[in-house]
Amino acid sequence: MKAGKQTTLRQQTAISGIGVHSGLPATLTILPAEADTGIVFVRCGVGGDPDREVRANFRAVTATEFQTVLGDATGPLCSTAEHVLAALAGLGIDNAIIEIDGPEVPIMDGSAEPFVQAIDRAGIVTLSAPRRYIQILKPIRVVNREAYGELRPNSRGFRIELDIDFAHPLIGRQGVAYDIDPATFRRELARARTFGFMRDVAKLWSAGYALGASFENTLVINESRLLNPEGLRYADEFARHKALDALGDLALAGAPLLGTYRSVCGGHKLNHAVLSALMADTSAWILVDGPEIRPEIRQEAPRRAIRGHADQATGLVAPAFGPDVS
């Protein structure tokens, strides 16, 4: 197999909005990084000076309730990291510094598409260092009642096979399966939005969640129908968003996976449990030079970073970053 090369951004790019859970504004800036840097989150303090930093790694996960939270021994650094991580992984970007001046990654429209657009404005460049992959050598499975997640060998690349099952007439049982590459990610997963149920609003508010949720960033479902006037982007958008979350969560392996991830009725907690189980079993994986899975190289880049803004809320709703077992 011919090994690919590592990548990074051509120049920095920025995106601004509010956190779906905290409701607080934040600007997230993605900067180029040298080879072998990986993905590193930097929380900016007073005056924009670096405060703390944490490598995007499964060991840095401090919470998985409704979102993936990264932090260290001193506490959380950045919550709802999964969508920007999915965008970077889906486009094949190995190295980047992510600076954020708030506690939560902006939710934007509830999908990864705004992050993809920001990355496209910056452009992607290939570095001279070879890319290394984590090759799955044997199946690793985690079971939680009717839910389970499993990583299996797949030397050709990374594949997601995912089923969800909600007792709701609009959702029911949905399944998706994709071999992940930049073109497939853009076409099939990047635009899939998070979703939530109106019946859960009071409980989430009382627990400090969903304070920034609105019809602008969440698909909202009552007992019988979707309340968003624009409708769905895909008939199975619910399952596609769960696959998007899984891609972001599994990016915390620290290198691209050569394997197939199978998930049934899962979520952030299960995704992290499977990845942790894999990394704990050193006989289940190995670092290898992998096939050349090329990212899309955008030659044109913006002259300056693009700054967005938070949309005005049209009403608070409950986001479904969970439950992890449905």
Image: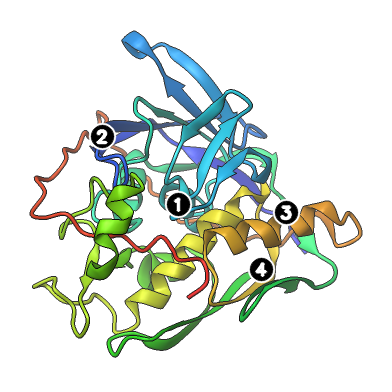
Question: What residue does disc 2 label?
Answer: 24
Three-letter residue code for mark 1: Gln
Three-letter residue code for mark 2: Leu
**Residue 157 - label:** 4
Q: CA–CA distance between discs 3 and 4?
A: 20 Å
Is 286 placed left or right of 81 in the picture? Answer: right
Q: Position of residue 165 (x, y in %)?
A: 46, 84
> Which residue is rendered at x = 28% and y = 32% of the image?
26
Three-letter residue code for mark 3: Ser
Graded by Cα atoms within 10 Å as few (under 14), some (14 to 19) or many (20 or more), the crowding at tag 1 reads many
Mark 2 or 4 closer to N-term? Answer: 2
Q: Position of residue 302 (x, y in %)?
A: 26, 36
Graded by Cα atoms within 10 Å as few (under 14), some (14 to 19) or many (20 or more), the crowding at tag 2 reads some
Q: CA–CA distance between discs 1 and 3?
A: 17 Å
Location of residue 283 (image quadrant): bottom right
Q: Which one is closest to the eye, mark 2 or mark 4?
A: 2
Where disc 2 sits, the SS reads loop
Mark 3 or 2 closer to N-term? Answer: 2
- Name the image colouring: rainbow
215 versus 104 height, above or below:
below
Question: What residue does disc 3 label?
Answer: 276
Mark 1 or 4 closer to N-term? Answer: 1
Q: CA–CA distance between discs 1 and 4?
A: 26 Å
Three-letter residue code for mark 4: Gly
Q: Is residue 115 visible?
A: yes
Mark 3 or 4 closer to N-term? Answer: 4
Q: CA–CA distance between discs 3 and 2?
A: 30 Å
Q: Which one is closest to the eye, mark 3 or mark 4?
A: 3
Question: What residue does disc 1 label?
Answer: 67
